Amino acid sequence: MRIGELADRTGVSVRSLRYYEEQALLVPTRTSGGHRDYPEMAVDRVIRIQELFAAGLHSKKIAQILPCMRDVDGGPSEQADEQLVAELTTERDRIDRMIGDLVRSRAVLADVIDTAAGD
Amino acid sequence: MRIGELADRTGVSVRSLRYYEEQALLVPTRTSGGHRDYPEMAVDRVIRIQELFAAGLHSKKIAQILPCMRDVDGGPSEQADEQLVAELTTERDRIDRMIGDLVRSRAVLADVIDTAAGD
DNA sequence: CCTGAACCTGACGTGGATGTCAGATTCTAC
DNA sequence: GTAGAATCTGACATCCACGTCAGGTTCAGG
């Protein structure tokens, strides 16, 4: 599919999709005229990439993770080496703390909203 | 307490604490010589601020939220107006989606780690 | 063909929290 | 009072995903 359609279907901007290619996160094939051509599975991949960005990961690390993901269409993948596993463990722990922060912030907002409404 | 001690006790940099003052998130009193002087409750407040930053809120909105928080030492507070409640509701929903993203990303990382370790 | 929509590359701009450095002043302990 | 640590102000630097604009090319329908 073309880049515009992928953008529409994922809610991600065309600019961002070009950025993903630049960062080697999602490299499409090209039509004879040079236009980007994405496969169906790109939709899922874009969503995963967005989730990983939301979790505070940088594009370089995402590029390392993607080939190690299991649920990737088209079979298994690479194996994370020792170095990467160590880094991902650190990231995972950071995400755990971050989830805690979000849950507490969520509660704060809900409380402010409720206090204004019910009171 | 002095800014350095507050930084040590919260894990937040001195630079950030000065930024919080600039943004009216946490305004300390001053010693006769002009040094910042923070009360005990500043420790909790800094932690709350960090959590709200982690949740993707900007300093301007945090500045609006802080006076409306219930758990603030020193009694109740202001009431969020209709406009603010609407904005906070949007933010709350965004945080809910973000938590979902983080949980899924966390699972992806854990899976990559496990796959590399156990396989 | 021909036109308008969609896409291309390349480059520069942006926002926001924070790092960092310089030069001056204040605090603390002796 | 004096040295050295801590703090002060002000300004500029940084990171990084993404916005945006310019000028040109490709694509799809009539």
Image: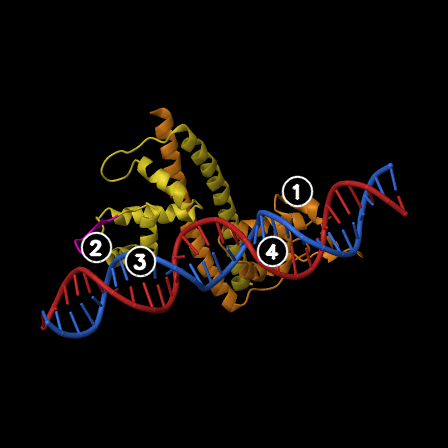
Chain colours: A yellow, B orange, C blue, D red
Q: Amino acid at mark 2?
A: Gly
Q: In x, y percent, where is residue A78?
A: 30, 32
Q: Earlier in the sequence, mark 2 or mark 3?
A: 3
Image coordinates for residue B58, horizontal then vertical, percent: 52, 58
Residue labelled with disc 3: A14
Instruction: Say which element carries label 1.
Output: helix
Contact flag, marks 4 and 2 (Cβ < 8 Å):
no
Res B8 label = 1
**Mark-to-mark CA distance, 4 and 3:** 43 Å
Spatial CA span between label 2 and label 3: 16 Å
Spatial distance from mark 1 to mark 3, Cα to Cα?
43 Å
Q: Position of residue A66 (x, y in %)?
A: 33, 40
What is the quadrant of the N terminus of chain A in the image?
bottom left
| Residue B64 position within the rendered picture, expressed as x and y whole percent measured from the top left | 57, 62
Q: Which residue is mark 2?
A: A34
Crowding at mark 1 (Cα within 10 Å: few <14, some 14-19, many 20+): few
Q: Are marks 2 and 3 in contact (CB under 8 Å)?
A: no
Q: Between residues A11 and B101, which one lies in front from this camera angle? A: A11
- How far apart are labels 4 and 1 at the CA level? 26 Å
Q: In the image shown, does A82 or A6 lie closer to the viewer?
A: A82
For label 2, the SS is: loop
Label 1 sits on what residue type? Asp
Confirm whether circles 4 and 3 share one chain.
no
Please name the residue shown 27% across and 56% down the image.
Answer: A9
Subunit bearing disc 2: A
Q: On the picture, is A31 further left or further right than B106?
A: left
Q: Is residue A86 above or below residue D1?
A: above
- Chain to which mark 4 belongs: B
